[in-house]
Amino acid sequence: MIRSKSFGSRLSYIIIWLLLLAMTALCFVPMMNMVSISFSNSSAASANQVGLLPVHFNLNSYSLLLEDGQFWRSFLISIERVVIGTSLNLILSVLMAYPLSKTTKQFAARNIYMNILIFTMLFSGGMIPLFLVVKGLGLMNTIWALILPGAVPIFDVILLMNFFKSVPESLEEAAMMDGASKLTILFKIYLPISVPALATIGLFAIVGHWNDYFSGLLYMNNPANYPLQTYIQQLNVDMTKITDPSQLKALASVSDKTLNAAKIVVSILPVLAVYPFLQKYFTTGLIIGSVKG
Amino acid sequence: MHKNKGRTGQLAYHFMMAPGMIFLVIFSFVPMLGIVMAFENYVPAQGIFGSKWVGLANFQYMLQIPDSWNILRNTVIIALGKIIFGTIVPIIFALLLNEIRLKWAKKTMQTIVYLPNFLSWAVVAAIVINVFDYTGPINNFLTGLGMHPIMFLASNHWFRKIMIGTDVWKNFGYGAIVYLAALTGIDPGLYEASAMDGANRFKQLLHVTLPGILPTIMLISALNLGNILNAGFDQIYALYNPIVYETGDVIDTYVYRVGLLGQQYSFATAIGLLKSVVSFVLLISANKLSIKFANMRIF
């Protein structure tokens, strides 16, 4: 009886392990394959001979990539967007979250602002009116078209607001006694305690700005102004256009699969760089992430 | 004196709200005014105020053309598929991972499985195209079994399934975090008590674990309900092509392609408006539902 039970539980343990390893491999292999292609010999890659490991390991595609001016131009545009966009997101979130964390007794208009925020979160004019506004303001083909429409991240404001609410009132009162202004209180008292919340918001904003490809497509008429992920998406376009096997051969000779793979790998390096830090804040970020869906 | 101080405090708060509010007015409220385009025959040269008022003509046209029903059907099928499998798979993964005691192995698997969530759809699309390529690994496997290779991304039979599958692939690991958190919140005493009553692992799963994470499942499902008209623009736009418009064209891709690129501004704004209104109602209901059933509010 006891033996059969332990056998049964051992068997189920093995099955659990196998299933988990299968699911992990399912995620790992396609990503690893892309990395391996980037380090492989071109002909092996276009013949689809590359599996988990590179075939005829070499760095040719990476040395070719170094000379690709447009790739690096797009890379810099994305870096610029991440730096300005994330800073703006953080500044605006902090400034809005603090007054909203007050009660209506402390800040009479608090609920009015809150309702406005929630309304803009739930309802939008849609893609086309926003596009016409951005165009009308003369922001087309500028970095501001990628940054300003999403300048106020409402979920982040709410997350930060809830965090600020947990800051003890006594701290603020003590500072008020010393004659500190609201802004001083916000920056000297609230911000230092809110580092985890700010880090969460900041890291998710970095990834969000870096990964967005559609704004670039929508607001940039000139491919020279594409941010990096829009540039990457355009590489795919050539591939999705193939709807007939006979076109494949022509394409293989035109585009270099290993070079494209190298571009993709380099384009995810910044995400990988912040990934370890992101992992620390997954659970806090989840609140933002799950709502954003 | 005291009253005066209170007023300056209020003023300081308004000043802090101001920068953000300016952006919201320009990029949220002004576009909402643009909704009047849906009731006009908008011509860019004549502007919003100069264009001809047509009432509900754009909406009537929408009801007449077959495209509308097609994109609505595609949107709901793809979104529903993603919601269903995007809920089940993370739960399964979380339940399996919860059984593992080996910390480093757990951590390694989580690190790998969470990663795709943080890649852009442009990158994931490249991976998908590579995997489903005509001579790619999946077709190699099929031909190895003696079957014919398939143009997966140019097949109306496969396109929606691939959209659902790859979306689940990208997000299931990260989606499991919320269930893992819920699992750690279950009182271990409940397991001990049920073991004393002679419950086996499966019975424990059914009577302790699942009821324990049910509120979380309800909350996430309620949230997802609000997304039923969001089939995932970034993904579909990065992967579709004219051959699969029949099964893959969704509301957002249609609005972008026909409305924006095709410059049918008024018609596309009308579609967008209808979508916004329905989503708004769904989100409000979702919030009500989650307060009622899970005692949690979304906003």
Image: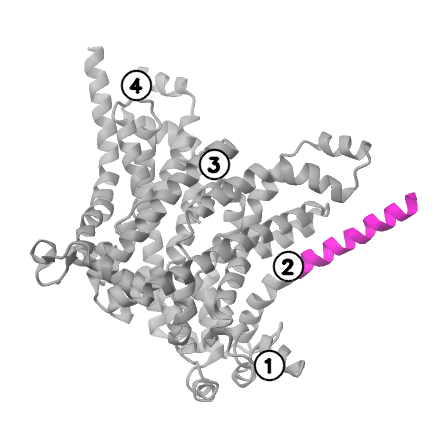
Task: Choose mark 4 or mark 1, whichever is in front.
Answer: 4
* Residue occupying image coordinates x 43% and y 81%: A242
Chain bearing mark 2: A
The residue carrying mark 1 is A49
SS at mark 1 in the image? loop
Per the rendered image, the range of residues in magenta is A1-24
Report whether residue B44 is seen: yes
First of labels 4, 1 by sequence position: 1
Query: Could you confirm whether marks 3 and 2 are on the same chain?
Result: no
Label 2 neighbour load within 10 Å: few <14, some 14-19, many 20+ = some
* Residue occupying image coordinates x 43% and y 40%: B286
Relative to A54, is A4 above or below? above
SS at mark 4 in the image? loop
Circle number at residue A105: 4
Label 1 neighbour load within 10 Å: few <14, some 14-19, many 20+ = some
Circle number at residue B290: 3
Which residue type does callout 2 highlight? Met
The residue carrying mark 2 is A23
Q: Name which quarter of the figure residue B39 lies in.
A: bottom left
Task: Choose mark 3 or mark 2, whichever is in front.
Answer: 3
- Residue B87 percent across, percent down from the top left: 55, 50
Which residue type does callout 1 highlight? Gln
Which residue type does callout 3 highlight? Ser
Query: Could you confirm whether marks 3 and 1 are on the same chain?
Result: no
Nearer to the camera, A186 or B229: B229
Label 3 neighbour load within 10 Å: few <14, some 14-19, many 20+ = many
Q: What is the spatial separation of the Cα atoms under label 3 and label 1, in whole angstroms?
A: 50 Å
- Whether the magenta-drawn stretch holds residue A10 is answered as yes
Relative to A98, is A87 above or below? below
